[in-house]
Image: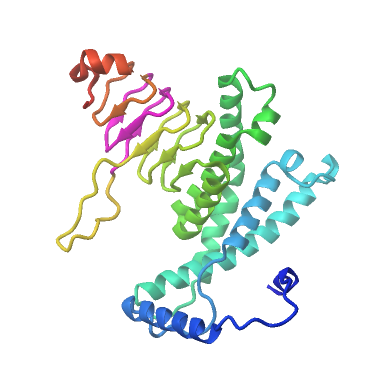
Amino acid sequence: MTRLNHYSKADHAIDWQLDSVVHALRDAREQWRADHGRTNESGGRSLPSREIINEVVETVIGAVFPMRLGPSNLRHHSEDYFIGYTLDAALNALLDQVVLELDHTAMRRGEAPQDHSGQAIAIVRDFGAMLPTIRQWLDIDIMAAYRGDPAARSVDEVLLCYPGITAIIYHRLAHQLYSTGAPLLARMVSEAAHSATGIDIHPGASIGSGFFIDHGTGVVIGETAIIGDRVRIYQAVTLGAKRFPADDSGQLEKGHARHPIVENDVVIYAGATILGRITIGHDSIIGGNVWLTRSVEPHSNVSQASLQKSPCQAGIEV
């Protein structure tokens, strides 16, 4: 914050009438806390830090791919030392953030304060133990991108340059956090990837091996989507929900399976929108700009032309 002082070109202090702004912001905070049952909040900030989570993820990625995404001065003979040292620091930093999430979740539920360190250690230990498996999955994803794109000159180019690979790296880390009990941190990780790549994958989505997003901008994959192995999708594809059931009070119900299931070896071309808990059968091809709200059988080939000729046989609504 102090460096902002260097940006002022004024030779004298300006009266911004900040007293009224500070008081109005305090009133807004107090009103929000009253509306959300937070009037008993005290102490310091209780939420995890986006900055720390971003640093943890970048550190972990560098440890998973040390000679390509690690520090530029790293040498082969010191790889293991670097990985051990950096993961120790990253996992300890992650532990603090997991504790903050668990404490905050308990507070939101009105539960009595308790020590969540044991639960947090288990979550972080599971996360660390899964990193070798995640690396193996990512190697398959990278190879799928290399084989699936004639413009790719090497697997190194794919890893360093392809936004779809960046998004899936972040997703596989986020999904592990989501699955083991840190959904807020997982969402923070996925939103960092969304900001960087324009690809929005909810950390709850289940994605099989050999997944390739080509180009990627505008892709949206919802929380309960299930994607099989060797699936390829292109830019502006949406795997979304068709409708959102509400309870008696009008509030949206949470947790329902509402996104598509995409089976193995499916290709979905640019601009396709697939909505609802429907199934895209294995080995199917979904053409560009198709709007799909009903399941299709395996080995289907759905295109704009097939919709115009026989939408019922294509299994879709127009």
Q: What residue is drawn where x is 39% and y is 23%?
A: 288
User: What color scheme is it?
Assistant: rainbow
Pick the residue in front: 183 or 87. 183
Q: Is residue 260 magenta?
A: yes
Pick the residue in front: 77 or 173. 173
Examine the rendered structure and indicate whether residue 252 appears above or below residue 22. above
Residue extending furthest toward the left:
248
Q: How many marks can you see?
A: 0
Q: What residue is drawn where x is 49% and y is 54%?
A: 186
- On the rendered structure, is 185 left or right of 278? right
Q: Quadrant of residue 300?
A: top left
Q: Which residues are magenta?
A: 258-283
Estimate the x, y position of residue 68 in percent, counting from the top left.
74, 38
Q: Do we see residue 176 in this rendering?
A: yes
Examine the rendered structure and indicate whether residue 149 appears above or below residue 107. above
Examine the rendered structure and indicate whether residue 105 appears above or below residue 239. below
Estimate the x, y position of residue 126 in percent, counting from the top left.
54, 54
Q: What residue is drawn where x is 51% and y is 36%?
A: 217
Estimate the x, y position of residue 95 in percent, counting from the top left.
58, 64
Estimate the x, y position of residue 43 in percent, counting from the top left.
52, 84
Q: Do we see residue 181 in this rendering?
A: no
Instruction: Please identify the quadrant where the C terminus is shown.
Output: top left
Pick the residue in front: 191 or 290. 290
Instruction: Please identify the quadrant where the N terminus is shown.
Output: bottom right
User: Looking at the magenta stretch, what is its main secondary structure?
Assistant: loop
Q: Is residue 275 magenta?
A: yes
